[in-house]
Image (cartoon, helix red, strand yellow):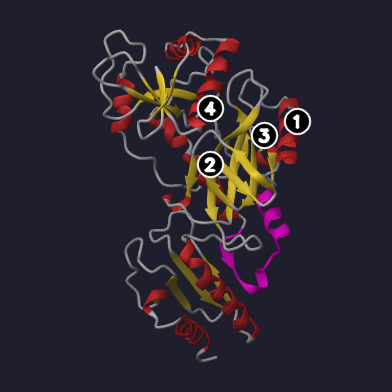
Amino acid sequence: MRIIEKNGAQVRTLTPAEEELLVGFASATLVGPRLLQANQWLMKVRSANQWLACDCRKDALPVLNVSLNGNTGTLFLRNNPDTPEHAPGCPFTKDEREAMERSEDVPPPAAWLPPDTPLRLLGDFRRDNAGNGTGGETGERREQQRLLSLLLTWIEASGLNVYATHLKKDLTAQFAELRGVAGRYPLLERVPASNYLETRLDMKHMMMLKARLRESSVFGNHRRHGLLLDCVEQIKGRKVLNARSEDGFDFQGHHLLWGGSKTGGPLLALALYSPATAGSHYYELIHVASVPVLSRAHLFPVYRDEEREPLKALVSLIDWMAGKGVKVLMRRPVIGGEVMDELVLTSDQDRVLSVSLLEKPLGPEPDTENFKRYADFKSPETFRKYVAGFFMRER
């Protein structure tokens, strides 16, 4: 067995001790410190974006990747799609589960999560095989989407997806709204998320959360976990970067994106924080969900980076109209909307205008006279004059 780069270049051959550890991991015979050692070693391979190539055949190299159980946050080995079959008797032979996984549908889109219902964002460790998750089953892969659903639900419930001049809040008040909403969402039965939520991602607050989790008795036999929520600069690879840390913070799981496309920061990020293996006292970031926001001071959701400048101009225009006595409210549906790039503007005069700030549509165009696309106007000033005229005429 050897470690390779994704372009096929060899990094090095495994030592006999490493190969023995890997065989034990694949066959689910490791326990205790040996299992923890295997997980830590595999995490290094995964973090380096490297693969494993098996030497069981002389004519071909079956390739494996270190994958992740989306539900439990534990590691497992998966044969790459279309990789050659292993030699008969090889402990890393493909199994039927992997073929079933590849044939399943993609996870469903984010959905509204009802309050006062246990979230169960992270599955418990298996008692028979705590660290070598045999998961990856479709239901478990879909569970990881709950973290993104939770972030979007909190954005809607706290009103961050709504802007009006008379509703304007500073950053402290916006995070206070998020923390207030979190109190209605239990991680487990009678365990409010707000009790194990830190709204700053740095080493100090991670240690504070870790201490509360380790001392807590409310999780019972369930896996201890908490949440970290913050406005960050960017998420690159498996690292969360913010202004307070040059090195950033590693996470071992998945980055869940609103709309499925990477957008530049700032981003409102929600991260799961938990031990990666049973019995471990080492807490780490598991999955991270993110939603682009207008600025570090204004957490209004942004669908694509190209929206930011016209959206800032639209916010400024709404403030200008408020000064003229016309109250306009702008809302972005972040869950369940058929056209996710649509912004809905309404005024106290019962006028309604839908606009898109993207150059190209992402879904079906609304069949209404009151829908306008920013890209169809000759200039930003022409768009601004149209919107102002739409809401201020007949005053």
Mark found first going from the N terminus, 1 or 4: 4
Please state if 207 lies on the left or on the right of 22 as rendered: right
* Looking at the image, residue 282 lies above or below residue 354: above
Q: Mark 2 sits on what residue? A: 147
Mark found first going from the N terminus, 1 or 2: 2
Residue 66 at x, y = what percent?
A: 44, 26
Please state if 180 lies on the left or on the right of 85 as rendered: right
Q: CA distance from mark 2 to mark 4?
A: 24 Å
Mark found first going from the N terminus, 3 or 1: 3
Residue 321 at x, y = what percent?
A: 59, 83
Give the residue type at disc 4. Lys
Mark found first going from the N terminus, 3 or 2: 2
Q: Mark 4 sits on what residue? A: 44
Q: CA distance from mark 3 to mark 2?
A: 17 Å
Q: CA distance from mark 3 to mark 1?
A: 16 Å
Specify the label residue 211 is tagged with: 1
